[in-house]
Amino acid sequence: MSAISSEPVGALSLPPLSLYIHLPWCVRKCPYCDFNSHQRPQVLPESAYVDALLGDLDHDLPAVYGRPLVSIFFGGGTPSLFSARSIGAILDGVRSRFRLRPSAEITLETNPGAAEYDRLEGYREAGVNRLSFGVQSFDDAMLKRLGRIHGGDEARAAVRAARAAGFDNLNLDLMYALPGQTPTMAAADLDAALELAPEHLSYYHLTLEPNTVFAARPPSGLPDEELAADIEAQGHERLARAGFEHYEVSAFARTDRRSVHNLNYWRYGDYLGIGAGAHGKWTDLAEGSIRRRVRQKVPRLYLDAPQAESRISEDRWVPPEDRPFEFMLNALRLHEGFPFRDFTARTGQTLAALDGHREALRRGLIEVEDGSVRPTELGRRFLNDLINLY
């Protein structure tokens, strides 16, 4: 372990650039969900929404012109409610405006209850090369309590359909510490997921987020803190035995299958965000600044806006003094941490701006070695406390 370097700061440099595309509609809003999702109308306005997305892209393009995309992510909502034709039209529009890296990761989130083989095959032909299934559980009774529209067998069938359609990169979302869940039940859920041999697993604790149905009316039988910790520990051990690398707080991947898109977020990369409620962040070298932009979140108001400019609800520069916290909020989620050179290059700040480091070191929450910092096991356990030091 070594002290923090006092090396001079360099100028801002351009990090990788990603694109996030938000499709806000679901079949039904889940009681635990705090994302910008809305129950779908009787007829989805696919054509109008595709036009609006490409209008957003045209509006933002001058700020990042000439920069290649390393990843594209369709999030929601349930993006798989959109036809393969619409997803293809969006990707064609992106390709006509951007150069994509040959290895660009293109992910589409999908609900196992809205996954059909013909549609999955169409997504693959359109250029999607990674699917993320919101499975959450394989226990039918648990899924019902969570408000999900699919069952365990449907989840298994959806994964098989994705493999048949040619997808070789799949993520499964799985929750634990569910209402009435025991360690045995949680282990069975995880084993069911592992039997499907996904390349990536997002394994995360059910949280009662503000402004959700579960926050207003918590379900009965939620595991207490000690039981939830036991379930988490056994799950992490099971995933390690199965050959998954625990590389981020709730992300586990097989070799070379980390999420490119999410890693770019966690490393304080740049990303455009198009669609209702989408967030974007990018670096402007000419101004020596970092900018954030947010779109109108209500789908109806988003679509009713007469032009791309009027679909923007927030547009601001990130003050230099805010950048260290923003960087650390993301980077400390990674088990490997980050090199100091990335902090200086992506925030434009001196290492002196990391005034919380000495306290974090004193409390054993981080370790510093060979010009890099990473959270310790204690720091990962008390991550919110660690981040708040900055």
Image (tube, rainbow, N blue to C red):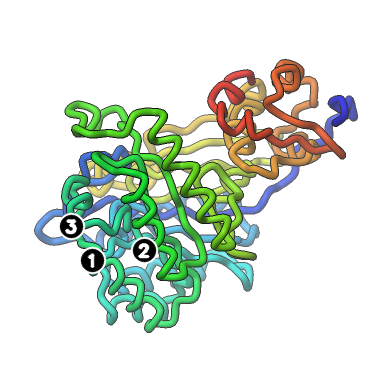
| Residue 385 to residue 377: above or below | above
Residue at mark 3: 149
Q: Position of residue 227 (x, y in %)?
A: 38, 34
Q: Is residue 160 left or right of residue 202?
A: left
Badge 3 element: loop
Q: Position of residue 122 (x, y in %)?
A: 34, 79
Which sits earlier in the primary sequence, circle 2 or circle 3? 3
| Near-viewer residue (166 or 83) | 166
x 54%, y 48%: residue: 271
x 38%, y 41%: residue: 295
Q: Nearer the viewer, mark 1 or mark 2?
A: 2
Where on the picture, by quarter, is residue 112? bottom left
**Dot 3 and dot 1 residues touching (CB under 8 Å):** yes
Badge 2 element: helix
Callout 1, which amino acid?
Ala
Q: Where is residue 247 in the image (x, y as percent from the top left)?
A: 61, 49
Callout 2, which amino acid?
Ala
Cα gap from disc 1 to disc 2, whole angstroms: 20 Å
Q: Which of marks 3 and 1 is in front?
A: 3
User: Which label number is shown at residue 192?
Assistant: 2
Q: Residues within 10 Å of mark 2 (few under 14, many from 20)?
A: some
Q: Where is residue 117 in the image (x, y as percent from the top left)?
A: 29, 79
Callout 3, which amino acid?
Ile
Residue at mark 1: 114
Q: Which of marks 2 and 3 is in front?
A: 2
Q: In this view, does 384 lie to the left or right of 54?
A: right
Which sits earlier in the primary sequence, circle 3 or circle 1? 1
| Near-viewer residue (377 or 212) | 377
| Residue 155 to residue 213: above or below | below
